[in-house]
Amino acid sequence: MIKNTFKVLATLALPVLFAAGCGGVGDIFGTDGGSNDVCPTGTTLYAVGATYTNVVVSQITDGCNEGLTPTTPGLVAARNVVYDKTSGIVTVTSMANGTLLGQGPVKCNTGTLNYGPMNVDDNNCNWTTTRTLDFKATGDYNITLNLTDDRTNIKTSTAAGASCKQPTPSCTNKFTLTMTK
């Protein structure tokens, strides 16, 4: 009986071991997007590295009481996007002051970019920010970023005359940036 049990287990394990040696068990179940990090058949890879000057802001949730609108200067400002082909890492920064918005791996036109936690002080409030950007390339030099800015440890700044209007102890801003070169 024990001998038969081992035969059954060996018979079941052999295909899994073979798949692991040829691209991973995820390939058997179709959960890894294709073997050896290859995009699914029919995927068109888009060019992304550029300075994006046309920025449209939508789907705003102003949970931090900053008065965000689709025309807020800091939101519609140009962005610099750098794609490192060797590592697959995309970095998004503000063109105005070089502030890092997010960085992370992108595969098959999509990825999650992160930033933080980082301490910020705008002379009215200080807080710890952690950003998540859901990145999607929708065409050559066309990108959509769904940005979530989670803020914690919010306090009034020590600057003279500071008046912090953000909710304490935490808040979240969300918005979508649609960007073209």
Image: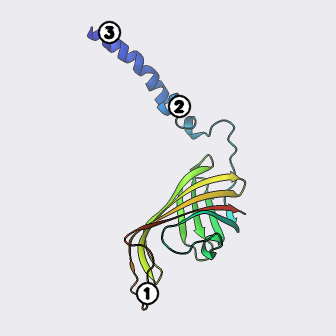
Can residue 21 be spotted in the picture?
Answer: yes
Residue 162 versus residue 107: which sits nearer the camera? Answer: 162
| Residue denoted by label 1 | 162
State the SS at label 3.
helix
- Near mark 3 (Cα within 10 A), the count class, few <14, some 14-19 or many ≥20, is few
Residue at the image position 66 percent from the left and 70 percent from the top = 78
- How many marks can you see? 3
Residue 115 versus residue 153: which sits nearer the camera? Answer: 153
The numbered mark, 3 or 2, whose residue comes first in the sequence reads 3
Amino acid type at image mark 3:
Asn
Say above or below: 141 vs 27: below
User: Which quarter of the picture shows residue 2?
Assistant: top left
Residue at the image position 40 percent from the left and 83 percent from the top = 157
As drawn, which residue projects farthest toward the left? Answer: 2
Residue at the image position 41 percent from the left and 74 percent from the top = 127
Left or right side of 131 for 75: right
State the SS at label 2.
helix
Say above or below: 56 vs 44: below
Tell me how far mark 3 sits from mark 2, CA to CA. Answer: 29 Å
Amino acid type at image mark 2:
Asp
Q: Position of residue 163 (x, y in %)?
A: 44, 85
Select label 1 or label 3 by which is in front: 1
Evaluate if marks 1 and 3 touch, with contact meaning CB atoms under 8 Å apart: no
User: Which quarter of the picture shows residue 168?
Assistant: bottom left
Q: Position of residue 149 (x, y in %)?
A: 49, 65
Which label number is shown at residue 4?
3
| Residue denoted by label 2 | 27
The numbered mark, 1 or 3, whose residue comes first in the sequence reads 3
State the SS at label 1.
loop
Say above or below: 8 vs 129: above
